[in-house]
């Protein structure tokens, strides 16, 4: 299906738009803003930036990306998965590195969208995505242990090393921060889901923890001042662009690009199932690209479409992308009206939000299905990707995940099923098919699966012993493609059969496979007269020709 223009998307989306629909969008947008507020603050801190940076990111992403999105339901902002990538960048290159990598990733996303390459993102197996998501969830959870316990432990290169460091001791947990974080965790776990639709549990938990901290006068670490502007003091500019490190930032930028694209398109897939409206993937990537190119100049962090916020918008009755705009305006108003209150939010409370969010990030239904049904290949891919994510640099984890994805893909399609049957002439006659004789020298091989380099060994082995076969018919209706290695395997089979005076025939060859065989000269070598529409036609012809051998 060709990509529809943004103007066409707008026409379809706002056709018949009415005050009643606007009212639905308004209420849905305010609901999403209530959900997004604590997440934006938390993910800003988790990214290694600030709560204000997370808030600015959510506001700008909601407006810019929302206006350019490939579907009416996508709502973008800072996310947990992205924060896990960014915290490593901050440690190595500072905020300037995050902004530069975000700018580059925005450019890459824009190029991918303009070149209409979005569909290739869908080729990553779900087991790899689930493994990467679970690994990131662990990174987020482990990264918040310090704030939850009220301690400051030695930093580590990876989440696995950070976790192991806690077993060495050397720190004293603060009971006050544990209590504040625990209040948020318990609130999010015990607050009924049906009530969260009216008042988000994360927001309630933060309100309770902040009120208790203020009432008791505890001096626990807090968010700090929230600037009353979209232009943060710390933001990207030509003067602080790390020109000397741009080459080093290419790999992290590609990681952010891949993560942003996958997360945005996954969000679109989930929301599409909920609404029946198809996401225009390339337009979505264009919107994500432009948004992420602008956000660093305001001091924000890279953004992507968020499944939780988009789902809330849909379940709240949202109709159009106005929901994203309203949610952004709601966050903007909270910045100006509630800045002094948000400044007093304990970091332990945000840690509680992030820990519960990290647990919920895991695709538990997919994991239970994968391990419950014992899909060994998917289990291995999931485990390798998850372990690579928490033990290695995230850029390396992306590369390993991509390699695993390719290996999983090849493993799934490499097998070609070949069933060889002797033709029973008597049965043909019982079916009313006229035959010329009673020779039993015709065999039919039914092939299922692509005939490419990974399947040629199995193909050669299947036809190693041709016996007294005078006519071999390859039924290829189940062969979707052939590559050059497959052509060579067929050619060797043809020569082998031809030497013993036999004939190689084909039935049900797909057009693309036939075109490849013509390019490789096989049709000319074997003869167009040996290609048939069905196996029955080929069998009758082969049986007629075969009588001369009897």
Image (tube, rainbow, N blue to C red):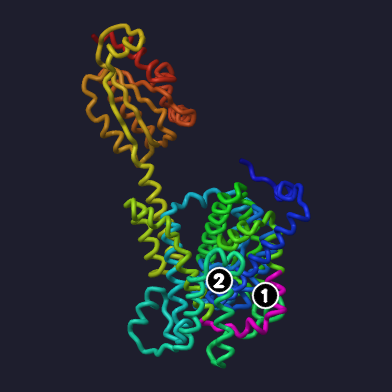
Q: Label 1: few (<14), some or many (≥20) within 10 Å?
A: some
**Residue closer to the observer: 94 or 417:** 417
Upstream in sequence: badge 2 or badge 1: 2
The answer to whether 224 appears left or right of 154 in the picture is right
Q: Which secondary structure class fits the magenta region best? A: helix
**Residue 466 image point, x, y percent:** 24, 25
Q: Quadrant of residue 479?
A: top left
Secondary structure, mark 2, is helix
Q: What range is drawn magenta here?
A: 330-348
* Residue 108 appears in view: no
Decide if residue 334 is on the left or right side of residue 505: right
Does 338 appear in magenta? yes
User: Going 69% across and 55% down the picture, which residue do you hit?
Assistant: 320
Circle 1 residue? 237
Left or right of residue 344: residue 25: right
Q: Position of residue 66 (x, y in %)?
A: 67, 60
């Amino acid at each position: 299906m060709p990509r529809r223009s943004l103007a066409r998307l707008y026409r379809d989306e706002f056709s018949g738009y009415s005050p009643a629909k606007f009212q639905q969008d308004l209420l849905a947008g305010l609901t999403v803003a209530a959900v997004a507020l604590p997440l934006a603050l938390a993910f800003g801190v988790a990214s290694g930036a600030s709560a204000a940076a997370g808030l600015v990111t959510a506001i700008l992403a909601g407006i810019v990306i929302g206006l350019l999105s490939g579907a009416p339901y996508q709502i973008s902002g800072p996310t947990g998965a992205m924060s896990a990538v960014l915290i490593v960048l901050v440690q190595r290159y500072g905020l300037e590195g995050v902004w530069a990598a975000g700018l580059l990733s925005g450019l890459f996303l824009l190029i991918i969208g303009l070149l209409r390459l979005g569909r290739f993102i869908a080729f990553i197996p779900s087991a790899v995505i689930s493994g990467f998501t679970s690994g990131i969830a662990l990174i987020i959870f482990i990264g918040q242990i310090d704030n939850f316990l009220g301690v400051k432990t030695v930093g580590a290169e990876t989440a696995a090393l950070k976790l192991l460091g806690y077993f060495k001791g050397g720190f004293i947990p603060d009971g006050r921060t544990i209590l504040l974080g625990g209040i948020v965790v318990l609130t999010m776990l015990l607050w009924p889901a049906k009530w969260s639709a009216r008042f988000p549990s994360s927001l309630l938990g933060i309100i309770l923890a902040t009120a208790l901290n203020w009432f008791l006068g505890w001096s626990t670490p807090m968010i700090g001042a929230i600037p009353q502007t979209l232009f943060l003091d710390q933001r990207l500019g030509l003067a602080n662009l790390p020109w000397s490190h741009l080459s080093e930032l290419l790999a992290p930028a590609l990681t952010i690009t891949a993560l942003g694209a996958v997360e945005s398109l996954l969000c679109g897939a989930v929301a599409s199932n909920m609404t029946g409206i198809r996401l225009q993937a390339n337009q979505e990537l264009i919107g994500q690209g432009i948004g992420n190119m602008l956000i660093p100049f305001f001091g924000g962090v890279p953004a992507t479409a968020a499944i939780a916020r988009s789902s809330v918008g849909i379940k709240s009755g949202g109709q159009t992308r106005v929901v994203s705009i309203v949610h952004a305006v709601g966050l903007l108003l909270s910045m100006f009206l509630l800045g002094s209150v948000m400044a007093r939010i304990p970091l332990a409370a945000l840690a509680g939000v992030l820990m519960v969010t990290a647990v919920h990030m895991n695709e538990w239904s997919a994991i239970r299905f994968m391990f419950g049904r014992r899909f060994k290949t998917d289990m291995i891919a999931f485990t390798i990707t998850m372990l690579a994510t928490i033990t290695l640099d995230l850029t390396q984890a992306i590369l390993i995940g991509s390699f695993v994805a390719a290996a999983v893909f090849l493993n799934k399609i490499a097998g070609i099923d070949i069933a060889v049957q002797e033709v029973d002439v008597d049965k043909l006659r019982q079916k009313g098919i006229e035959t010329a004789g009673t020779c039993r020298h015709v065999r039919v091989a039914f092939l299922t699966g692509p005939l490419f380099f990974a399947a040629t060994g199995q193909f050669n082995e299947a036809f190693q012993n041709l016996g007294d076969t005078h006519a071999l018919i390859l039924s290829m209706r189940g062969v979707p493609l052939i590559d050059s290695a497959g052509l060579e395997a067929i050619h060797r089979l043809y020569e082998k059969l031809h030497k013993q005076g036999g004939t190689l025939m084909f039935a049900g060859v797909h057009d693309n496979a036939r075109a490849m065989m013509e390019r490789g000269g096989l049709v000319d070598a074997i003869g167009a007269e040996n290609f048939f529409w069905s196996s029955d036609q080929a069998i009758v012809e082969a049986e007629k020709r075969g009588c001369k051998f009897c």
